[in-house]
Amino acid sequence: MSPLARATREDMLKLLRGRRGDQGVRNLLADIVLLPRNPFEPERRRSPKRAVVTIVLLLLVLFAAAIWFNIRALP
């Protein structure tokens, strides 16, 4: 194997074995739920999207109403 091919193979193996912080299910879910990253402030925390907050609040209200009416129905 030529030195260039060996170096290329080693570099490819490093990329495949290394930890990639920009991939994964966690990052996919974060991109769906949170606002986009600001490339100029990478350390700043991201806020949740307005639609996600609205949906979560509506689900909590529906859950609370279901519990309330079930408790009220008890003798």
Image: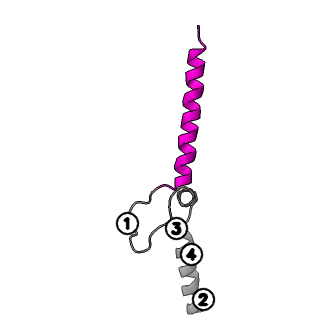
Measured as percent of width and height from the top left, residue 65 is found at 57, 28
Query: What's the mark number on residue 16?
Result: none
Q: Amino acid at mark 4?
A: Leu
Which label lies toward us, 1 or 3?
1
Q: Is residue 66 magenta?
A: yes
User: Of the residues under marks 4 and 2, which one precedes in the sequence?
Assistant: 2
Q: Are marks 1 and 3 in contact (CB under 8 Å)?
A: no
User: Of the residues under marks 3 and 2, which one precedes in the sequence?
Assistant: 2
Which residue is pictured at 45% across the width and 57% down the height? 47
| Helix, strand or loop for disc 2 | helix
Q: Amino acid at mark 2?
A: Ala
User: Of the residues under marks 1 and 4, which one precedes in the sequence?
Assistant: 4
- Vertical position of residue 20 compared to residue 48: above or below: below
Which label lies toward us, 2 or 1?
1
Which residue is pictured at 56% across the width and 61% down the height? 24
Q: Is residue 62 magenta?
A: yes
Query: What's the mark number on residue 5?
Result: 2
Distance CA(mark 3)–CA(mark 2): 27 Å
Distance CA(mark 2)–CA(mark 1): 38 Å
Q: Say which residue label 4 marks.
A: 13
Q: Are marks 3 and 2 in contact (CB under 8 Å)?
A: no
Q: Say which residue label 3 marks.
A: 22
Residue 1 quadrant:
bottom right
| Helix, strand or loop for disc 1 | loop
Q: Are marks 4 and 3 in contact (CB under 8 Å)?
A: no
Q: Say which residue label 1 marks.
A: 43
- Vertical position of residue 21 compared to residue 8: above or below: above
Dot 2, how many residues are within 10 Å of its Cα: few (below 14), some (14-19), or many (20+)? few
Which label lies toward us, 4 or 3?
3
